[in-house]
Each structure stands twice: as C-alpha cells, then as structure tokens.
Image (spheres, rainbow, N blue to C red):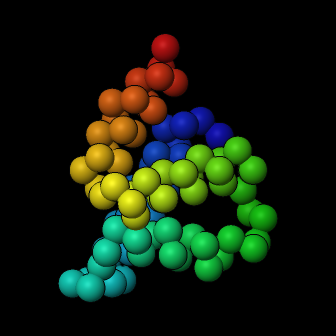
Amino acid sequence: MPVKYVAEMLMDRIAASKVYKGKIYTDADPLLYFQSAREIPIMHENTRKLLLRLLTMLAEQGEKKTFAYVKGTLLKKKQK
C-alpha cells in the first residue's frame, strides 16, 4: 500500500478515536484499539507493521512529533 494511504489510515484512526472517546481521549487510544483488533489479518504485513510503528510513536511521543515525522520524513522520503 502506498505510504500516503497508510498516513491517511493513521489520521482516520486518530480522528475516530477522538470522536468516540471525547474528552477522555489519549494518544494511546488508537494503538489500543488497533491491538484489540489485530488478530484478524485484513491488511498486508508491511502495511500492518508501518501502521503499528506509527501508532506506537503516537502513544509514546505524542501527536506533535508523530505528525512531524509523517509529514517531514515519511511522506517526503517516499516522494523522492
């Protein structure tokens, strides 16, 4: 899957978690949801690994650093 779509998948999961959790949202919520549904092999292994890495980064380093990495490193690297 192209990296830009994995980035979009990340953003969709963050947005959905914020809507569902409301004021009790934390940056770990998208990762926790992903881990709870991980047993179903519905995506390519490389896509799953990249999404897991990004969700883990979000949980551990926060939204600001994760967004900066996606925009400034991941997407730019794949465009070249």
Q: Residue placed at 43% from the left, 54% from the top?
A: 57
Q: Nearer the viewer, residue 11 or 56?
A: 56
Residue 16 visible somewhere in the drawing: no
Q: Is residue 7 in view?
A: yes
Residue 67 position within the rendered picture, expressed as x and y whole percent measured from the top left:
32, 46
Residue 68: x and y in percent read: 29, 40
**In the image, residue 66 above or below residue 2:** below
Out of 71 and 60, give the one closest to the viewer: 60
Identified at 57% across, 56% down, the residue is 52
Position of the N terminus by quadrant:
top right
Residue at point 29%, 46% (across, down): 65
Residue lying farthest to the top in this orientation: 80
Tell me: residue 68, above or below residue 52: above
Kindly indicate the quadrant of the structure image that contains residue 11.
Answer: bottom left
User: Position of 34 compared to 54: left or right?
Assistant: right
Tally of numbered discs: 0
Q: Quadrant of residue 58?
A: bottom left
Q: Toward which corner of the image does residue 70 lie, by quadrant?
A: top left
Which residue is at the far front? 60
Q: Position of residue 39 (x, y in %)?
A: 75, 74
Q: Examine the rendered structure and indicate whether residue 35 appears above or below residue 9.
A: below
How far from the left and from the top, in percent, is residue 41? 78, 65
